[in-house]
Image (cartoon, grey):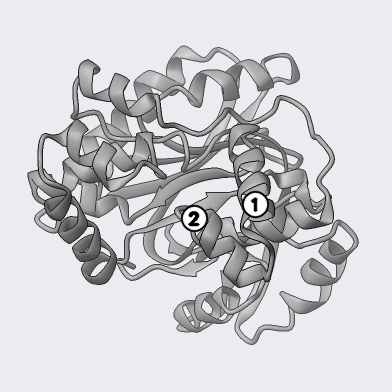
Amino acid sequence: MSADALGGGDLDLVAALQIAPRASMQVLAAALGVSTGTVSRRMARLRERHGVRIVGQVPWWLGGATPHHVWISTAPGSTNQVAAAVAELDEAQFVATTTGRADVFCILHPTRRADAADLLTRTLPSIPGIVGTHSEPGLHRFASGSSWRIERLGAQRERQLFEHRHGPLPAAPVPFGEEEREVAGVLQRDGRASAADVARELGKSASTAYRLTQSLLDRGLVQPRVEIEPALLGYPLEAVVSLATSASTMRDTATALATHPSARYVTTVAGTSSVIHQGVFQHDDDLARFLTDDLGRHVGVTAFEVSVVLRVLTRYWTPDRGG
């Protein structure tokens, strides 16, 4: 485990929140066998000292655009400045400096599909220090930060918490009303926002805010999740693995990789890669075993490239205090 990792009580709370991010203090306290005061103090410490947040993940198709995964090559000595400039973009969902394939890896998610061309051909190349980019749009997400979690609570406590978990993401896009989009925006920034918080921020009645909030959560249209630096959980090594596969095995490979313990983000893409696997690991040996043993089991994988994350600047649109 990393020397910077959290202690046992804090890890237990994070593990509980990964299962039930909106569970009440009373539910969390009962599951963890501590007082509500202890849970409240630990929550405040995680937030204030470590930048831990509960966010609401919204579907790709909410705005009609898919994210673009971009590898950026920079001029010598300009990598950090380029990464900082990219992190300032409104579309920047994830930004990190990396080794391997490029100097900077980012996930840029424009609000509308029509905005993607301008973002990739004008906005991004205009940043000083960028000498080249390679972009691959996402096709279908198989795993995300809302599904990755640490295992430490045991089956009984996990069952208690799963009763308070949000609904699953719909298998196919469903229509969003304008009011639902507004509420989704509030929950995206604060995944634990109450109906009262939503009503106050949007100027809606308490009953309307409650109805819209519960509808979005029950239908899985907003997926609350814990956003935390993986090193705090004992996973200091993060890597982005771009895989080329045969066409016939692309979906099966992504589906299988999404169940791997390291998988924080898995998606199929359109480009020179077929699948992107963003994973976290406890040791270099774990990454080595993943590349040689786990990927080796997938006969459809024809090639892969590895970008090891050096420093994260932005995770899910917010500056990363652990980076």
Q: Total label count?
A: 2
Q: Nearer the viewer, residue 259 or 39?
A: 39
Q: Residue at x 55, y 74 (%)?
A: 87
Q: Residue furthest bottom?
A: 128
**In the current view of this chain or complex, which residue is farthest to the right?**
114
Q: Residue at x 32, y 60 (%)?
A: 52
Q: Which residue is mark 2?
A: 194
Q: Position of residue 317 (x, y in %)?
A: 55, 65
The correct choice, above or below, for 200 with respect to 176 in the image is: below
Which kind of residue does numbered mark 1 sit on?
Answer: Ser
Residue 175, position as x, y percentages in the image: 84, 40
The answer to whether one can see residue 100 in this image is no
State whether residue 261 appears in this view: yes
Left-right relation of 216 to 239: right
Of the pair 95 and 28, the residue shown nearer to us: 28
Is residue 54 toward the left or the right of residue 45 in the image?
right
Whether residue 86 is situated above or below residue 34 in the rendered picture: below
Residue 207 is labelled as 1
Crowding at dot 1, Cα within 10 Å, few <14 / some 14-19 / many 20+, comes out as: few
* Dot 2 alpha-carbon crowd within 10 angstroms: few under 14, some 14 to 19, many 20 or more: some
Q: Residue at x 86, y 56 (%)?
A: 113
Q: In screen coordinates, is 156 left or right of 97? A: left
The image's mark for residue 97 is none
On the picture, is 311 further left or further right than 236? right
Q: What secondary structure is found at the residue carrying circle 1?
A: helix
Q: Secondary structure at mark 2?
A: loop
Which amino acid does the dot numbered 2 rest on? Answer: Ser
Give the residue at x 39% y 68%.
320
Who comes first in sequence, dot 1 or dot 2?
A: 2
Q: Is residue 61 above or below residue 297?
A: below
Which part of the image, by quadrant, shows the N terminus?
top left
